[in-house]
Amino acid sequence: MSRRLTRSSISHSGLTRFLDVDEPDDDEEWVTGDVSLISADNVRFRVAGLTLAWSSPVFADLLSLPGNQAEKVIPLTDNAIESADVIRIYLDLVSLNFGRLGIFYKSYTRWAALLANLTFFLDKYQSERGLKLLRSFGSEAVTLQRFSRMGDIIFASRVNDLALCFRILSSGNKKSKPAQNRRPLGTMDGSWQFSLALQSYEAASSIPFPFQWAIARAAEVEDRETTPRIFAHRFVEIMMTIYEQGRRRQFVKLTPGAMDLSGHPAFPPLLQTPNLDGYTKPT
């Protein structure tokens, strides 16, 4: 009878060999290393323990526990945030294999939900280095114009990088391409890329609601076309006000899967402080 790994089969140290369980499928890229990560959907990633320990204090603690097996095995069980797709991106990220992160250069529909799950993975394993690398990757991709048309602002908002949002919004007016989909929830023709009402519902809803609202509010009080930098500064000011009010009123819930007041997924604790590195507030 086929049996899957359960929590009861994990040793006290949290590291175990698999006995009497389905043999995991091997990932095609991650095939060497002294540690095996087994995803929740039963894919094995062999990776250097030093890489894991460097990337996360939680993994470092796990790997420091005593064990007499030649290869240490870390089984993961959360189907949402510990899937093979999430682990693959995480390992490529912390190994500086940015060239293997090409999924983010495709349509945002391919990666928006995956990116959200990745941020909760980073939070669970307290990977501040992983988050820093993720934001660095996004900044490089925006600079090289590798994201899709809406992908840049979706990515920047999903990783709570206000400095990157400022760069994107201050870059000036970008004409929208003629709409290919004229269904009620599809894209409409318009003169400004970040007019969210002209984007498809799916694109606009991929941006966390506070960012949507701040973009719309800033556009009401500043001329986004003739003074884009002033508009972008106003956006950052509004976002910081939202965060300050949120801290006072405890708007933000901290558990994975929790929703903010708008019904959108809240940022996990690791991401709740926005990135402002490189941003200079106007005097």
Image: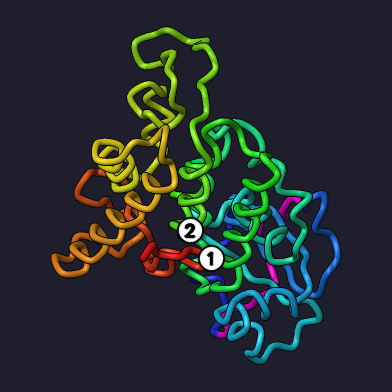
Q: Residues within 10 Å of mark 1 (few under 14, many from 20)?
A: few
Q: Nearer the viewer, residue 230 or 163?
A: 230
User: CB under 8 Å between callouts 2 and 1?
Assistant: yes
Q: Amino acid at mark 2?
A: Ala
Q: Quadrant of residue 39?
A: bottom right
Q: What is the span of residues highlighted in magenta in the rendered image?
A: 13-26
Measured as percent of width and height from the top left, residue 2 is found at 62, 50
Quadrant of the snapshot with the C terminus:
bottom left
Q: Quadrant of residue 264?
A: top left
For the question of whether residue 180 can be seen, the reply is yes
- Mark carried by residue 163: 2
Front-most of 84 and 116? 116
- Name the secondary structure under disc 1: loop
Q: Residue furthest left?
A: 249
Report whether 212 appears left or right of 108. left
Residue at left 46%, top 43%? 169
Q: Residue furthest top?
A: 182
Task: Identify the mark nearer the N-term, 2 or 1.
Answer: 2
What residue is disc 1 on? Answer: 278
Helix, strand or loop for disc 2: helix
Decide whether residue 185 is among the magenta residues.
no
Name the main secondary structure of what is drawn in magenta: loop
Closest to the observer, 172 or 268: 172
